[in-house]
Amino acid sequence: MNRPIIFSIDDDPQVLRAISRDLKSVYGKEYKILSTTSPNEALESLTDLKNSSDVVAMFVCDQRMPEMEGVEFLEKAIKIFPKAKRVLLTAYSDTEAAIKAINDVQLDYYLMKPWDPPEEKLYPVLNDLLDDWQNDYIPEFKGIKVVGYQFSPQSHTIKDYLASNLVPYRWLDIEKNPDAMEILELNQLSVDQLPLVVFDDGTFSTKPTIRAIAEKIGVNPQITNEIYDVVIIGAGPAGLAAAVYGASEGLKTLLIERKAPGGQAGSSSRIENYLGFPAGLSGADLTRRAISQALRLGAEFLSPQMVSDIKQKDGYKTIVLDDGPEINSRTVVITTGVDYRRLDVKGIENFTGAGGYYGAAMTEASACKDKEVYIIGGGNSAGQSAVYLSKFARNVYIIIRRDSLSYSMSAYLIQQIDNIPNIHILPDTEITEATGSNCLEKLTLINIKSKETINKEAAALYVFIGAKPYTDWIKLDILKDEKGFIETGRELRRYDNFGKIWKINRDPFLLETSCRGVFAAGDVRAGAMNRVASAVGEGSMAISFVHKYLAEV
């Protein structure tokens, strides 16, 4: 945490050196001492200090300065740091102005120049003032601040990106948090420029793209290798496991992710059936551990970055990025996973990111406090989210088309849900319409057996209605099944055109696609088991086949 600041301002360089020297000698370890001869320069710097969550504990300011008098400076400075202590340096002739300043700017003390010896005339006064300040001081959050409207899709996208990448931030709702408007006024901005991201160095960006945020916070390093041994596309559990094993076994490894690491598992509030964690762990925690492990072992990580195509030439694979240089690799492992299917219901698209969310969206959980929340879907992801949201919401309703959760949800989760009184199951039910003004407010539900329709208040709807593979971007001759999942191994021989594509004298390896040296693992692969542990297993297994492939080329 940054040290609090004591700011001294005096237009006389000799006096300024003297006060700065005396301040540093006693307070330099506990406080950061800043000094300047220009009150205008000092005022300009205060905005940056406020943006970066630094705090000024005390101003020590000369009264007679040509740019502006000390009292005028303090009047302006305390609008930015109202709790800072105020000390005025005065000559004998300035006594009347100093006494007036006690009322005008709530001056804490006026100090006659010279203050020798400081042990008698300076330090005792400042010690008392700083002790008073410390008693009331509550450290501000040090890090990124996001200012915006709660039900803004742009704000949701930024919050979701930062949270998914484990970047600490503070959310300030412009409609509820007075600090939010203070930040706008301080930087002379308007609400039309929201969302606003203020970085920890004091700089800010209005309506920033995710790419711009990534570049600013340094999570998007430059590519260092001309040719990689393996490029892994997708940083879900399968991709993370492949990166760990690839890097640990000495392969030049690059991991590319279009959104944030962890995939759907990364947004899970609690994974309770993962081997070795009897108390369970969150998807974010699992992701953080895996990323740290992969980077420590030497893997490189590129995010957020979209891959638009893979090309083959002379045995090498060229990964084409949406925005950036092409990447050459000897092998590719596709672990792009799946996306939640969109809910085809009247009105729902109007509220995506404004009360309607695909996946867990844990960043919005606090906004559901004491409200009515709905979840549609009966799988484990839906159940885990219901358990998590029940800690915030007044009631959580799980909407399913079948008569029971037992068809698609693990028994341990069903038991948990049964024991939580504010979670309610709505079987044999569908949503027919979503309505609201600026955000989701109501859902129209229908019982598919009785055909009874009812309107219910809803502050949020979380959608978990199955998934589709993220494979539309693939243009290479990689065979997929009718649902778009990538076929691998022996299953490829079922396809009539396999023989036209596969031109080598061996069968594809178990996780190899119809394109030699390109592998698939995890949920994106046809026939894969949708479990975190199986995805991790396939990711690590893919690296063993990468080794076999590299040995033959």
Image: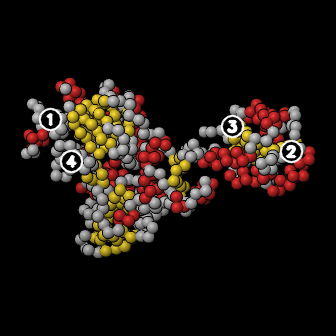
Q: Is residue 510 left or right of 234 when viewed as pictured? A: left
Q: Nearer the viewer, mark 3 or mark 2?
A: 2
Question: Disc 3 residue type?
Answer: Lys
Which comes sooner in the sequence, label 2 or label 4? 2
Q: In 3D space, how far apart are the residues under numbered discs 3 and 4 (Cα atoms)? A: 58 Å
Q: Residue at x 73, y 40 (%)?
A: 36
Q: What label does residue 32 carry, if any?
A: 3
302 left or right, relative to 191: left
Q: Which residue is mark 2?
A: 90
Mark with earlier residue (1, 2)? 2
Figure check: 507 above or below 528: above
Q: Nearer the viewer, mark 1 or mark 2?
A: 2
Q: State the image quarter where residue 328 is shown.
A: top left
Mark 2 and mark 4: span between their CA atoms? 78 Å
Please tell me which of labels 3 and 1 falls first in the chain. Answer: 3
Q: Nearer the viewer, residue 328 or 277?
A: 328
Gap in angstroms between the C-alphas marked 1 and 2: 86 Å
- Name the element at disc 3: strand
Which residue is denoted by mark 4 in the rendering? Answer: 485
Q: Amino acid at mark 4?
A: Phe
Question: Residue 55 at what x, y percent from top left?
Answer: 66, 45
Q: Secondary structure at mark 1?
A: loop
Which of the image's four quarters has the C terminus? top left
The picture places residue 164, in percent across and down from the top left corner, at 42, 46
In the picture, the quarter occupied by the N terminus is top right
- SS under mark 2: strand
Mark 1, residue position: 508
Q: Tell which circle, 3 or 2, labels the residue nearer the N-terminal end.
A: 3
Q: Which residue is situated farthest in the right direction here?
A: 92
- What is the C-alpha distance between the residues marked 3 and 2? 23 Å
Mark 2 vs 4: CB contact within 8 A:
no
